[in-house]
Amino acid sequence: MKKLIINPWICTGCKACEIACSFAHEKKFNPRLARIRVTKMEEVGIDYPITCRQCRDAPCVASCPVNALTMSNEKTILVDEEKCIRCGMCAEACPFGAITLHPEDGLPLICDLCGGNPACVKRCAVKAITYKDVDVAIQLKRDALVKVYSKPILKAWGIASST
């Protein structure tokens, strides 16, 4: 299984991923129609792409009163447009704010990984968004945490230099 890996430390905030996503799904260049959204985190000075994280126990699926959302074998959330009553409960239930509603028809906009070939990954010039196997993703996350937290710890112990 593969997942999107987001590295906010190198995201430039260009929003090319939003444009690529909206075109891939809607054939329109409109960020409001994208299944990914770049948010600026002013307090830390980074831009952060937000998209579905394919939660193991997806609260969006559980919240749907008409069972219009299901999880595929690839762990993407599928929307049954015929069943969906456009209530927005899935968007409210998402703990990451990754679901928005289509501005014209009210259907939930949820990342489906473009069927295994994510448009956002192809358009990210700085590679802030990549598509990796889950095992690789877990190791990358561990490596990043070690990199971020080891310097202050080593410095506090007098092992690392102050640079």
Image (cartoon, rainbow, N blue to C red):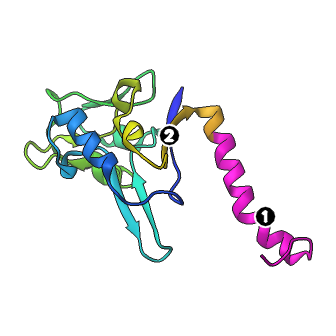
Q: In this rendering, would 97 be left or right of 100?
A: right
Asked where in the image residue 155 lies, by quadrant, the reply is bottom right
Residue 150: numbered disc:
1
Question: Relative to residue 88, is residue 77 drawn left or right?
Answer: right
Going 65% across and 41% down the picture, which residue do you hit? 138
Residues at marks 2 and 1, CA–CA distance in whole angstroms: 25 Å
Front residue of 99 and 10: 10
Q: Residues within 10 Å of mark 1 (few under 14, many from 20)?
A: few
Given residues 77 and 122, the one toward you in this image is: 122
Asked if residue 109 can be seen in this view, the reply is no
Q: Earlier in the sequence, mark 2 or mark 1?
A: 2
Q: Is residue 73 magenta?
A: no
Residue at 91 percent across and 75 percent down: it is 157
Residue at 50% in and 74% down: 44
Residue 73 picture quarter:
top left
Tell me, yes or no, if residue 98 can be seen here.
Answer: yes
**The magenta segment:** 138-163
Say which amino acid is labelled 1: Ser
Image quarter in which the C terminus is found = bottom right
Q: Residue at x 25, y 46 (%)?
A: 19
Mark 2 or 1: the one toward you = 2
Amino acid type of disc 2?
Thr
Residue that badge 2 annotates: 130
Seen from this angle, which residue lies furthest left? 104
Most extreme residue toward the front is 125
Query: In what quadrant of the picture does the N terminus appear?
Result: top right
In terms of depth relative to the viewer, which is nearer, 13 or 98?
13
Residue 127: x %, y % from top left: 49, 45
Q: Residue furthest top?
A: 73
Q: Out of 111 and 31, give the one closest to the viewer.
A: 31
Q: Secondary structure at mark 1?
A: helix
Say if 9 sits above or below 63 in the image: below
